[in-house]
Image (cartoon, rainbow, N blue to C red):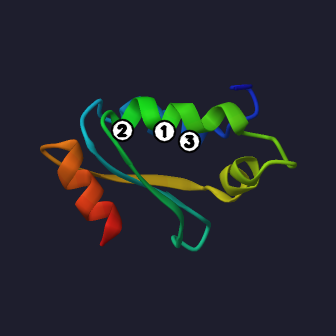
């Protein structure tokens, strides 16, 4: 991950993400989700995506290039996160 390429607003948001289970949403400029995922640790999972930031040749890099906001919903367990992601 080249952290100097990641917009400051996303860096700050990542720092505030919890290390708990849940669902995270990458949203574009219109607030529309471009990706929804589940995680045992929201912060760790979101950080793992950003190793592709700035890659115009990968699907994940393109998706991250469209991301302007990150939201999340915490859940008590990873299983509940899976159910929430599916809904």
Q: Quadrant of residue 10?
A: top right
Instruction: Please state which of residues 72 and 59 is positioned toward the viewer in this rendering.
Output: 59
Q: Secondary structure at mark 3?
A: helix
- Which residue carries the number 2 mark? 42
State the CA–CA distance, disc 1 to disc 3: 11 Å
Q: Residues within 10 Å of mark 3 (few under 14, many from 20)?
A: few
Residue that numbered label 3 is attached to = 10
**Circle number at residue 24:** none
Is tag 1's residue or tag 3's residue first in the polypeptide sequence?
Answer: 3
Q: Is residue 63 left or right of residue 56?
A: left
Q: Secondary structure at mark 2?
A: helix
Pointer 3 with pointer 2, Cβ within 8 A: no
Residue 62 at what x, y percent from top left?
76, 54
At x 30%, y 72%, the residue is 87
Task: Name the residue beneath numbered marker 1.
Answer: 46
Camera-near label (1 vs 3) is 1
Q: Residue at x 60, y 65 (%)?
A: 28
Q: Position of residue 48 (x, y in %)?
A: 55, 32
């Amino acid at each position: 991950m080249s952290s100097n390429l990641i917009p400051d607003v996303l860096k700050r948001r990542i720092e505030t993400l919890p290390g708990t289970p849940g669902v995270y949403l990458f949203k574009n400029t219109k607030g529309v989700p471009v990706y929804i995922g589940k995680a045992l640790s929201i912060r760790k999972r979101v950080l793992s995506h950003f190793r592709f930031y700035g890659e115009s040749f990968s699907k994940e890099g393109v998706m991250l290039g469209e991301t302007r906001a990150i939201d999340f919903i915490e859940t008590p367990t990873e299983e509940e996160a899976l159910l929430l992601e599916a809904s």
